[in-house]
Amino acid sequence: MKLVSKMLKAIHAQESKQAAREKARLVMAELKEMKLQEAAKKIEAGIEETLTYFEFPAEHWTRIRTNNVIERLNREIRRRTRVVGAFPDGNSALMLVCARLRHVAGTQWGNKKYMNMRHLDAALEDASLAG
């Protein structure tokens, strides 16, 4: 399965949408050779959806195609709940998670800009001038 994961990452590591499509075709052919027909079908069915980020400025690609912020938040919540161990009921667990989310939203970590929107504004301006 690690090989398939590397193959999928290779698709999204390309420098253009066309190159990513070509890499996807190669990956699908390789999966079919490996007798992984269903995996090849899944890629074929969903590849265009996963390449949507190429429509945005290149500076935003990594942030659009990954979910690192959500993963970090989940790790922080997991870390806090493990300290408690066993909760007496679901409400106390929910209160702890909500308190952590309020803290994150109210601190600099929650206010940090995830993307520089000037790149997107410039791309939209260029598109409106061209159209």
Image: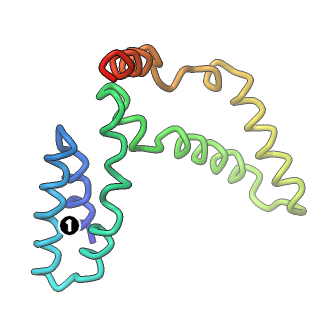
Above-or-below relation of 130 to 58: above
Residue topped by disc 1: 3
x, y percent for residue 22: 12, 55
What residue type is disc 1 on? Answer: Leu
Location of residue 91 with respect to 104 vertically, above or below: below
- Image quarter of residue 108: top right
Q: Residue 80, percent across and down?
A: 69, 45
Would you call the spot at circle 1 few (<14 residues within 10 Å), some (14-19), or many (20 or more)?
Answer: few
Q: Is residue 104 above or below residue 71?
A: above
Q: In the rendering, at what x and y percent does residue 121 appear?
A: 44, 17
Q: Residue furthest bottom?
A: 35
* Residue at left offset 25%, top offset 48%: 12
The residue most toward the front is: 131
- Kindly identify the residue that appears in the image at 73 percent across and 37 percent down: 101
Q: Give the secondary structure at mark 1.
A: helix
Query: On the rendered structure, is 111 left or right of 118?
Result: right
Residue at (69% x, 21% y) in the render: 107
Q: How many marks?
A: 1
Picture quarter with the C terminus: top left
Q: Give me the residue at 88% from left, 53% from top.
A: 92
> In the picture provided, is 105 more to the left or to the right than 21?
right
Classify 114 as above or below 41.
Answer: above
- Looking at the image, residue 106 sits to the left or right of residue 90; the answer is left
Q: 95 and 28: which one is in front? A: 28
In front of the other: 8 or 15? 15
**Colour scheme of the rendered structure:** rainbow
Could you say where residue 58 lies in the image, as x and y percent from the top left?
29, 28
Residue 91 or residue 69, whichever sits in front: 69
Quarter of the picture holding the N terminus: bottom left
